Amino acid sequence: MTFTLESFSFHVLPMHTRFPFKYGIASMNALPHLFVTANLVVDGKAFSGLASEGLPPKWFTKNPDTLFEIDLAEMIAVIQNASRIARLAAEKPTGFFTWWQNLYAEQSSWAKVKECPSLLANLGVSLIERAVLDGLCKALGQPLHSVLRSDILGIDLGAVREELRDMRVADVIAPAPLSHVHARHTVGLGDALSSAEGSPEDGLPYTLEETIRAYGLRYFKIKVCGKPEIDIPRLREITHIIDTNCPSGFHATLDGNEQFYDLASFREFYATLRADPALAPLFQSLLLIEQPLHRSQALHNDVGTTLRSWNEGPGMIIDESDGSLADLPRALDLGYRGTSHKNCKGIVKGLANAALLKKRAATIPGGPILSGEDLANVGPVALLQDLSVMALLGVTHVERNGHHYFRGLSMHSAGTQEAILQNHTSLYHRHPQGFASLHIQNGTLDLSTVNTAPFGCGITIEVNQFEPLNAWIKRGGMGEL
């Protein structure tokens, strides 16, 4: 299967949160949601592929000294550069994998010259990659899982990582995509727990207690700030609320949000929390610890010494440190048990990571971990594409928070919301106040319609209803957020 790329277009939909989402050094109140359209020609026929991503503050680069406008300009620059490379690589008919290899390599070389971190640089690769994959799935009339199992894209895992030479994509992904996944609810650093002072009157649950009851949640991702005097009282309340409202049991993960600069300090912090009797239910249900070390320190040699000697420690994974193809092998060598998948880190990269974890499973004490994490994803495109990949990777519980920090699909037109409600009847429902809202029942998401649509979404979205990116930048849109 070959294709050419005619052009890309970029459009922006500004989004505002229901209340601030506090994570690490950032507190997000608003962000631009970027739509990327890829115009392809496949076998002489024109197809349009679509991808989207919210561009959040202080995740791709965790620099406390820069303004969000500067960070946002950098995010846009890497995306536009990736589109330039992608178009040049597909001026003549090309196969998907050959095209992707060129895109990844050229973007990496450009990023090295620009001293751009690989996590940020590959945001551009991932968005362009997703838009093209959406177009190819539409051209084939098949969902992504079927396309990947057929090997029509020619993805060569051994060419991505030499040690995967004997593995095929079909050997890595689930035989059939998961029909349901558990929604793992984010408890942000500033989230209300049981008292609803200042709650938004928008028809959606606000406190942790309300949210558990409304959605029947059983899986939770709890963010910590790394200061016992703050974290312990808060974790005691969180543990009590979850334990009380989940009589059949629960599962939790802790997100360190890069708050530590050496593993010895985190080990001491962990021991302090672990020794508190009130937190016993939390630690009995703990699945993993996500990225406690700052990305500048997380893959240093001394981390491996401590990790390998910490026999009673939790399963620890990288997240923000998983920026390039070299990072997960390095992390596993040091003693980490795995990584996260987010579509913003790349689809081919995610497949290669899943393959590596499967390949090395027998050598990873406690077993490998591929977790599903979130970046405040919302529909109708980004969330559904992300869920599509989680389902085919077999990730059974996935952090979801976009529906909590944003008011469903209320920021979209009535036409878009109606299309989602009609085409994804199990994943969305009409809220009593009229807007389309994610439908979480008994703590799970039904992915039956996601798994049959071309790359998850399957509806036509008129991007011209949104503001063109360049016009948005010129009128000072970045300063409005």
Image (cartoon, grey):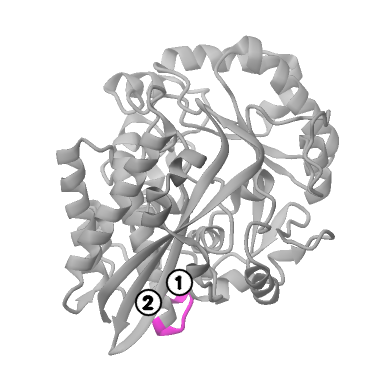
Rendering coords of residue 10 (x, y %): 39, 61
**Magenta residues: mostly which secondary structure?**
helix
Residue 124 higher or lower than 30, as above or below: below
Residue at 56%, 21% in the rendered image? 225
Residue at (26% x, 79% y) in the render: 3
Which residue in the structure is indicated by mark 2?
Answer: 136
Dot 2 surroundings within 10 Å: few (below 14), some, or many (20 or more)? many
The answer to whether residue 217 is above or below residue 194 is below
The residue carrying pointer 1 sits among few (fewer than 14), some (14 to 19) or many (20 or more) residues within 10 Å by Cα, namely: many
Q: In the rendering, at what x and y percent does residue 163 appear?
A: 24, 52
Q: Using the image, determine if residue 304 lies above or below residue 79.
A: above
Q: Mark 1 points at which residue?
A: 144
As drawn, the residue found furthest toward the front would be 475
Q: In the image, which residues are magenta?
A: 139-147
Residue 275 position within the rendered picture, expressed as x and y whole percent measured from the top left: 66, 13
Q: Nearer the viewer, mark 1 or mark 2?
A: 2
Q: Which residue is drawn at 41% across and 46% down?
A: 361
Query: Dot 2: what SS?
Result: helix
Query: Where does the image place residue 344, in percent across and percent down from the top left?
Result: 42, 51
